[in-house]
Every structure is written in structure tokens, then in C-alpha cells.
Amino acid sequence: MADSDQNLRICPKGHRYYKSTDCPTCPVCEAAKKPQAGFLSLISAPARRALENNGIHTLKDLAVKTEKEVLSYHGMGPNAMSKLKTAMEEAGMAFASES
Ligand SMILES: [Zn+2]
């Protein structure tokens, strides 16, 4: 038997998956959480979590924040910011202005 350093794990929802690290993230749950459409699907998982952790789930939530504020979130980077900006522009929205 080809024993590897991968361990069978079962997430709280009963998905079975193999992980070699201590990362407890279940890929099935991760995929289910990933929005199929919308701006959140455009950005990387860390950036998405950064937004979600700050209560941002829609472009409207984003529109009350300043660009600087959003960029300061842990996990957010210039690449994600530019995608967010594009998504905002396409929706005819913009970040709040610094004042
Ligand atoms: Zn799962």
C-alpha cells in the first residue's frame, strides 16, 4: 500500500478529503462557499475572506468603505483591489471618498 503523508480527514459536514498539512479547510466546503457569480468570485480566497471578515458581502457593502480602508484588511492586496475597482465601476459604483 502506497502510504503517503496524506491523512484522510472528515469535515464537520461529512466530506472526506485528504490533506497532508494541518490545514483544516475542506475543499468541498470551500468550493461550496465560493460564490459562483459576483465580485467575490473574482478575487483570491484570502482577499475574499478579508472582505467577509469585515462584513462585506456585496458591492453595496464595499461602497461605504474607502479604498484605503479596504486595502488595509489583512489578506487584501493590490491585485484584488484592482479587481474590486473594476467590479465597482462596472456596477456604476465607487468606493467612499476619503474625507
Ligand atoms: Zn466539507
Image (cartoon, grey):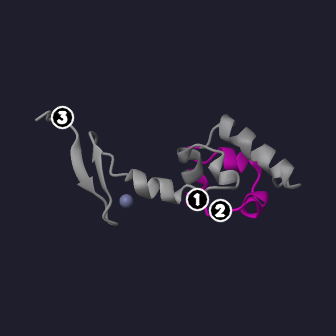
The answer to whether the residues at label 1 and label 2 have Cβ atoms under 8 Å apart is yes
Quadrant of the rendered structure where residue 80 is? top right
Outermost residue, front side: 1
Q: Does the magenta portion include 58?
A: yes
Amino acid at dot 1: Glu
Amino acid at dot 3: Ser
Q: Earlier in the sequence, mark 3 or mark 1?
A: 3
Q: Does the magenta portion include 67?
A: yes
Q: Residues within 10 Å of mark 3 (few under 14, many from 20)?
A: few
Side of 63 where 79 appears, left or right: left
Amino acid at dot 2: His
**Quarter of the image containing the N terminus?**
top left
Provide the secondary structure element on which disc 3 rests.
Answer: loop
Give the label on residue 52, or none. 1
Quadrant of the rendered structure where residue 10 is? bottom left
Residue 69: % across, % down: 70, 50
Query: Which residue is rendered at x = 54% and y = 53% of the image?
Result: 49
Give the label on residue 4, or none. 3
* Residue span colored magenta: 50-75
- Between 56 and 38, the one nearer to me in the picture: 38
